[in-house]
Image (spheres, grey):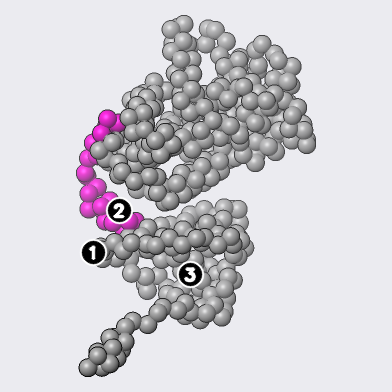
Amino acid sequence: MEKSADKSSTSVRKKKWVARPLVTQCGVCHSPATDVHHYGSVSCYSCRAFFRRTVGSGKEYRFCSKRTGQCQIDSNNRKNCKKCRFEKCLKIGMMQEKVNRRHPPTKKIKKIELKPLKKSLDIGDLVDECFVDEKDHCDDVKLDKENTNQNEEYPETDPENFKNLSPTFNLTFEEDFKIHELMVRKEKLFEEFYNIFLEFPNFVSLWKRFLFQIQTCCPVIQSGVPADSYDCNMKNMVRDNFVKGGLVRHALEMFDEFKYVPEHVKTETIEFSLTVLQICIRSYLSANKDQPTLIDQHFAAGTYNKAFQTAYDKVYPNNRFAVQSFDPLQLDIFTTPWAVNYDEEMFFKKTVTVLGSIVKDDVKLGTLFMILVLATPGAALSVEAQGDPSLKKVQSDISLLIYRYLKNKLADPDEASRVTNSLLMLIPDLH
């Protein structure tokens, strides 16, 4: 009897799962793949997940990263251009109708046993292949909520309630990855700023004068990116580029946080916030004026990018130590009197100083605050923009992420709540 019971228990025992061998190549990126067809064609697990997320969430990639529509897609650069990658998925025969757009809610969350990571593991593949199902489910639930609750009003975020709203566990892998993703996209946005500046005929001469005055410790520095009172309106060029769908618009479209915001509300809010963003940049640079060089200052402030380095190399090629750091408040545009009255000037300098003292060289915190600034309409904007539920959702999500990041960094919920509250109170002052 015991032997027969052992045989029966053995017969019902589940077989151990064995991964399929990677015997062929992905038709999209040429990475190793199984011989199983995913949505109608052979693809690797990463491209399969990318196709499922794109179709399932209804995303539309309107811009090519190189603006050619002919990007090469391989295992090394497949994440560089989503538009060309998706078009190649369709070209090899992957069919959108085979994707299940709505996943039923999971009844039970299985505990995931984390194993030591291999040295050759790519962080992008880790996100795509290990966390894709959980993220897809969250995206689908979020999409359902957006479709069914368009008129739902989101309450104003109260920093004092963060301790009750925030889970007790530490910053998750997904949250940390999200912050890094926002940092990359912010850097791309700043890079496009400088690309626009470099196209201006007089920029190099103005930039050379600007760097020389910093190098010679001029008491008043003439700005390399002049204000509207000068003979070129580069700040207006950035705003016009955004409105007309240029490089800046392309960079901002990379932020998924704004995908549910109505187009006219998005345009009105971001066009206003771009000017406030410049104040944040000055604040971060001012807080890091003790760095040894201008390049170190930009690195610490989180404003360094490839196009900035290109502009710098046009004046001082291969010499990163040529120009020391500087105080942005030394610029000629801040020479008294420059505001309506002296009190306004002092209020501005105090606000910039307080923001810089909080963020300092914390690039992650500075990035999150900048995204929050971009998503916050000013008091002078339309009632529709100020009350848009999708925009309020972005503000609420980023505010909570700021608190969770600070709680993880400071290991003190009360201090994290205080700092978050201080940052939120600065936004109306910056406006």
- Secondary element type, mark 1: loop
- Secondary element type, mark 2: helix
Q: Which residue is mark 1?
A: 107
Seen as rendered, the residue at the extreme front is: 2
Residue at 60% across, 19% down: 327
Residue at 59% across, 29% down: 234
Q: Is residue 244 left or right of residue 105?
A: right
Residue at 69% across, 35% down: 311
Mark number, residue 45:
3
**Quarter of the picture holding the N terminus:** bottom left
Magenta span of residues: 138-161
Cβ atoms at labels 1 and 2 below 8 Å apart: no
Mark number, residue 288:
none
Based on the displayed image, in which of its 4 quarters is residue 4 positioned?
bottom left
- Mark 1 / mark 3, whichever is N-terminal: 3
**Amino acid type of the residue tagged 2 in the rendering:** Lys
* Observer-nearest of 128 and 238: 128
Vertical position of residue 414 compared to residue 332: above or below: below
Q: Which residue is mark 2?
A: 142
**Residue 185 in the image, given as x and y percentages of width and height:** 51, 44
Distance in Å between CA atoms under marks 1 and 2: 17 Å
**Amino acid type of the residue tagged 1 in the rendering:** Lys
**Residue 124 in the image, given as x and y percentages of width and height:** 52, 58
